[in-house]
């Protein structure tokens, strides 16, 4: 196509978008070719596979561009010729295209470095990089010569813009005239492309060859990043060390087996077991409180500070610096687990562990992933026995997909939308204050009790979260000052709730479970600062449970099986978690993670699985919080892979659905 014919094609209202498309796929082609030679020893040189890498790549580039062009199309549909043909619009258009070219070239360069490190297009790791900006920017500054890179991209951008200006590729479009009816029709036709793309084309659509590199080459980086935002998943089988699945499950069945369990099937990938607990089943009501950001270090049992029972009655203002007086008093009268680790660093990971009792998956929590409905969960075990389930949250439950997840797994939803005006004495961005939350919880317990059904109410607190605001004059730490205030206010609210509940007719038959969602922080110089994952787990009601302190190494995924054991239930399970009380020493272990890194703690050893099939081993000191690199521990490495790879396999193949 000669220059004259090209200008003729571009001489209409949407000619600038067509020109941008040619540049978009041109940069994508150069980037794809660069990546091809970058991994020349790994790609399949079969002609059909190469053709697919480029042919499928053109398809995915077009799909990506269909999303990219949306704001341009919308603008061109509605702007009048008077504005469109004006000199000021021409100058603005060149500036916008200059910025757009820079973004496209910058993306191409970024893909080179991402591919060089991971051998794939953008994925959830790239999304994660956008979350951990401080660490990522620091790493980039130390790893690359940023001034040279930025200058090089700027020079390429100037050269590309000069070519467009010199040859009047954009000018011919800016000079064109249009009729409103025609440009609206053309715009609507163009907007059908992203709609059809969203419905018909997934990031995995082009994964048809047996060579991973050819499949990745066929993808488009921008579309892959968009897909990662939507799906929030990091494929374990691609990025982490793996073993044979059949052998994994053979070993997993041994790891999950306990003295009071038996497998219900000989199918190699079926981990369904029957747990038998002797004695009469107890149909206690349960109020399961997940506490925001409650690190174990805040609690008296970690500070070796004896609780004063008088503080449980409300005297918190003069407690000599203790910010958890009520919880400490409750813990002293409870079944208390002092060596339990959270699986992750966000609320949804904690909720996932508490309800599904399975190790974390790399990438986003299952709660935010598709196909998370009707899962084998603690809630559905209760529901099968006639319990009424409610998820009670002081904020808006659409956040982090919580309402969708809980409502599709047996729970009624009570969130901020359900609070009446007179029920809210204080609220901030995250939701109503914890006192209001627990007052509403009391009403929900009353209602369920009046209906004659036993109940499981899962409550999620919010006040121990920035900006740490709460009602004035409740505690001695002013609002909006520090996390200590948020913790102490939450502690006060829980104590007040338990005191009010003790006056209710349903109290004598109710267990109060208190479990943190995660710690207050997980930053540290090490890969996974394991001490920052320790959280409290409390089962309270002295009338029903004998107070006891249990120091066994255990995990957040063990919370549900332990609760069911306390209630003497015999039940079918697909849980990876175990009853902590019945654990023998060799069964003690914990799981910790941070999106990318998957940690397995056992016998003062920490094994960490990372992308690029990387595995590191540490000897840890749980008293000092120290980690020391050690040679490979083959047995623990195998166990870590067995647990994480199998948990991922179970989720991907929907083997953890409720039958």
Image: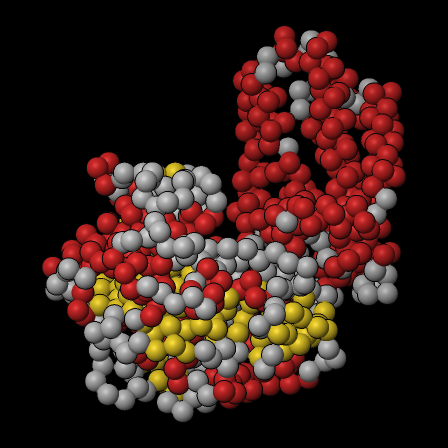
User: Can see residue 403?
Assistant: no
Q: Nearer the viewer, residue 120 or 559?
A: 559
| Residue 399 pos. (x, y %) | 43, 46
Q: Nearer the viewer, residue 249 or 430?
A: 430
Q: Nearer the viewer, residue 331 or 62?
A: 331
| Residue that appears at 82% across and 65% down | 42
Q: Is residue 425 left or right of residue 193?
A: left
| Residue 455 pos. (x, y %) | 22, 64
Classify residue 245 by image quadrant.
Answer: bottom right
What's the colour scheme?
secondary structure
Quarter holding the N terminus?
Answer: top right
Quarter holding the C terminus?
Answer: bottom left
| Residue that appears at 36% across and 41% down | 470
Q: Is residue 65 left or right of residue 200?
A: right
Establish if 551 lies above or below 446. below
User: Can see residue 589?
Assistant: yes
Establish if 131 lies above or below 209. above
| Residue that appears at 34% across and 78% down | 548
| Residue that appears at 87% across and 31% down | 155
């Amino acid at each position: 196509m000669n220059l004259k014919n090209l200008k003729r094609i571009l001489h209409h209202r949407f000619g600038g978008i067509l020109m941008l498309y040619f540049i978009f796929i041109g940069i994508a082609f150069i980037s794809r070719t660069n990546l091809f030679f970058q991994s020349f020893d790994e790609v399949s040189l079969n002609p059909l596979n190469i053709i697919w890498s480029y042919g499928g790549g053109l398809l995915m580039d077009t799909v990506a561009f269909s999303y990219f062009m949306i704001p341009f199309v919308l603008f061109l549909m509605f702007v009048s010729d008077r504005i469109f043909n004006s000199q000021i619009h021409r100058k603005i258009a060149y500036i916008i295209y200059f910025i757009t070219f820079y973004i496209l070239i910058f993306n191409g360069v970024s893909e080179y470095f991402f591919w060089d490190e991971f051998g794939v297009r953008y994925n959830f790791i790239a999304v994660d990089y956008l979350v951990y900006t401080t660490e990522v920017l620091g790493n980039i500054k130390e790893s690359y010569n940023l001034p040279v890179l930025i200058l090089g991209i700027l020079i390429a951008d100037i050269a590309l813009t000069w070519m467009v200006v010199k040859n009047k590729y954009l000018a011919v479009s800016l000079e064109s005239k249009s009729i409103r009816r025609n440009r609206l029709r053309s715009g609507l036709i163009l907007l059908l492309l992203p709609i059809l793309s969203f419905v018909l084309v997934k990031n995995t659509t082009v994964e048809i060859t047996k060579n991973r590199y050819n499949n990745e080459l066929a993808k488009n980086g921008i579309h892959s990043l968009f897909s990662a935002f939507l799906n929030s998943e990091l494929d374990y089988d691609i990025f982490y060390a793996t073993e044979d699945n059949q052998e994994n499950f053979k070993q997993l069945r041994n790891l999950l087996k306990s003295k009071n369990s038996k497998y219900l099937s000989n199918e190699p990938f079926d981990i369904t077991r029957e747990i038998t607990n002797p004695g009469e089943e107890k149909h206690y009501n349960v109020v399961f409180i997940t506490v925001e950001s409650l690190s174990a270090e805040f609690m008296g049992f970690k500070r070796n500070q004896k609780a004063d029972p008088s503080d449980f009655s409300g005297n918190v203002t003069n407690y000599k610096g203790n910010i958890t007086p009520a919880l400490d008093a409750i813990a002293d009268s409870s079944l208390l687990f002092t060596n339990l680790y959270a699986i992750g660093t966000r609320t949804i990971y904690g909720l996932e562990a508490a309800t599904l009792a399975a190790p974390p998956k790399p990438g986003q929590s299952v709660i935010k992933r598709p196909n998370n409905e009707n899962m084998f969960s603690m809630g559905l075990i209760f529901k099968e026995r006639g319990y009424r389930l409610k998820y009670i949250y002081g904020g808006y439950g659409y956040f982090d997909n919580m309402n969708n997840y809980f409502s599709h797994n047996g729970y009624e939803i009570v969130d901020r939308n359900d609070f009446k005006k007179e029920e809210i004495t204080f609220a901030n961005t995250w939701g109503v204050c914890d006192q209001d939350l627990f007052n509403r919880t009391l009403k929900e317990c009353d209602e369920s009790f009046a209906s004659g059904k036993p109940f499981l109410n899962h409550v999620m607190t919010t006040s121990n979260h920035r900006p740490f605001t709460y009602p004035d004059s409740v505690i001695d730490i002013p609002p909006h000052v520090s996390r200590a205030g948020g913790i102490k206010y939450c502690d006060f609210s829980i104590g007040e709730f338990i005191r009010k509940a003790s006056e209710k007719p349903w109290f004598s038959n109710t267990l109060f479970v208190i479990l943190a969602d995660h710690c207050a922080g997980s930053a540290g110089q090490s890969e996974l600062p394991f001490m920052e994952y320790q959280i409290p787990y409390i089962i309270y009601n002295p009338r029903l449970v004998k107070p006891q302190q249990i120091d066994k190494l255990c995990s957040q995924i063990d919370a549900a099986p332990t609760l069911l054991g306390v209630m003497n239930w015999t039940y079918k399970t697909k849980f990876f978690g175990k009853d902590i009380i019945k654990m023998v020493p060799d069964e003690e272990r914990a799981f910790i993670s941070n999106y990318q890194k998957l940690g397995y703690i056992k016998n003062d050893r920490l094994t960490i699985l990372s992308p690029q099939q990387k595995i590191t081993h540490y000897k840890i000191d749980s008293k000092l919080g120290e980690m020391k690199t050690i040679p490979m521990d083959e047995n623990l490495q195998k166990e870590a892979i067995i647990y994480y790879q199998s948990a991922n396999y179970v989720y991907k193949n929907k083997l953890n659905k409720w039958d």
